Amino acid sequence: MRETSGAAGEPADFAASFVRMAEDSAAHLVRARAEIGKVIFGQERVIENALVTVLAGGHALLVGVPGLAKTKLVETMGRVLGLDARRVQFTPDLMPSDILGTEILEEPSPGKRAFRFVKGPVFAELLMADEINRASPRTQSALLQAMQEGFVTIAGQRHDLPKPFHVLATQNPIEQEGTYPLPEAQLDRFLLQIDVDYPDRDAERRMLIETTGAEANEAGAVFTAEGILAAQRLVRRLPVGDQIVDAIIDLVRSARPEPGTPLGEKLVWGPGPRASQALMLAIRARALIDGRLSPSLEDVAALAEPVLKHRMALSFAARADGETIGGIIATLTRRFT
């Protein structure tokens, strides 16, 4: 099978070094998952997809009702991955400067005044934007532009964000009063939408016992920021075969409401090329997490819904007929399982 991208065709000594680096990163990722699992119970899929997001160099939207440890997940990931993690509670009165930072006028010496830039919480390596849809569209746009560009501009001056830089934003899918839903173009900037569901009975029982005692479990650090950057570079070098590339393209194109197609009347809009890029990076990251050197069709099927769900919208007629985005994606990915 011809490899379309990655480490194929490199000298033998480089290939051996690449394999060693991949095995070392995979071993660290196994430890990282275990450490996060000490604190976050019954959310293995959520943990995996959150790690996929970071390894792929993207941002994620966590959707779930309150009380499912979304905030705890971000705090724990920051500790385990060695990243500076911060949290911002989004409210209707939150201003862009409350996130990005602002310039203040100070007098460093008598008779001399100068502006000094005070960084906002966005200057973190891992930022939790809690209930992002509660902030005004202006504030949402300020954060989302920073996510896309990797820097902020204040008073005409560019200020680069740290590397790595990742945003894990949360939304409550039930209480929508007083919210400002993210526009489609802004949703597209999130690599994955991660749905956080209730844990099963065994996980909830373990949680009940282990979190109400005298001592709580603590997660230990596994990575550093430099280690995460190295893993991200490694992810982009994992080889991907023609069959997988064609599967990604076929899947994403089949999810668009083209006239005359089965989905033409069911969808209002569908995923663009950015979805293909997101899926390509995500399946590479998932393969590395599982200790594999190249992704498979199973990875495409597993990550199709998190990548595509927030990039598609049902028509009114489809909603009236009981259709769901998840059901449509499941039908499209049936060929890969």
Image: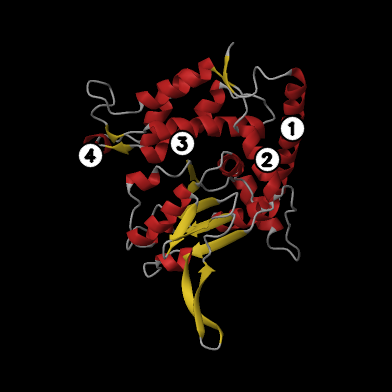
In front of the other: label 2 or label 3? 2
Label 2 vs label 4: CA separation?
45 Å
Label 4 vs label 1: CA separation?
50 Å
Q: Is residue 79 left or right of residue 108?
A: right
Q: Is residue 150 above or below residue 321?
A: below
Q: Is residue 261 above or below residue 158?
A: above
Q: Which residue is mark 3?
A: 307
Q: Earlier in the sequence, mark 3 or mark 4?
A: 3
Coordinates of residue 210 in the picture (x, y in percent): 71, 57
Q: Is residue 126 above or below residue 14?
A: below
Q: Residue furthest front?
A: 111
Q: Which residue is mark 2?
A: 230
Mark linked to residue 316: 4
Along the viewing direction, whichever of 329 and 12 lies nearer the viewer = 12
**Crowd band around label 1 with a 10 angstrom C-alpha radius: few (<14), some (14–19), many (20+):** some
Coordinates of residue 332 in the picture (x, y in percent): 40, 24
Q: Residue furthest bottom?
A: 110
Q: Residue at x 22, y 35 (%)?
A: 317
Q: Earlier in the sequence, mark 3 or mark 1?
A: 1
**Crowd band around label 3 with a 10 angstrom C-alpha radius: few (<14), some (14–19), many (20+):** many
Q: Secondary structure at mark 4?
A: helix
The image's colouring method is secondary structure
Q: Residue at x 32, y 49 (%)?
A: 183
Q: Secondary structure at mark 2?
A: helix
Label 3 vs label 1: CA separation?
27 Å
In front of the other: label 3 or label 4? 3
Look at the numbered discs 2 and 4 and tell me whether their residues touch, using CB distance below 8 Å. no
Coordinates of residue 37 in the picture (x, y in percent): 68, 47
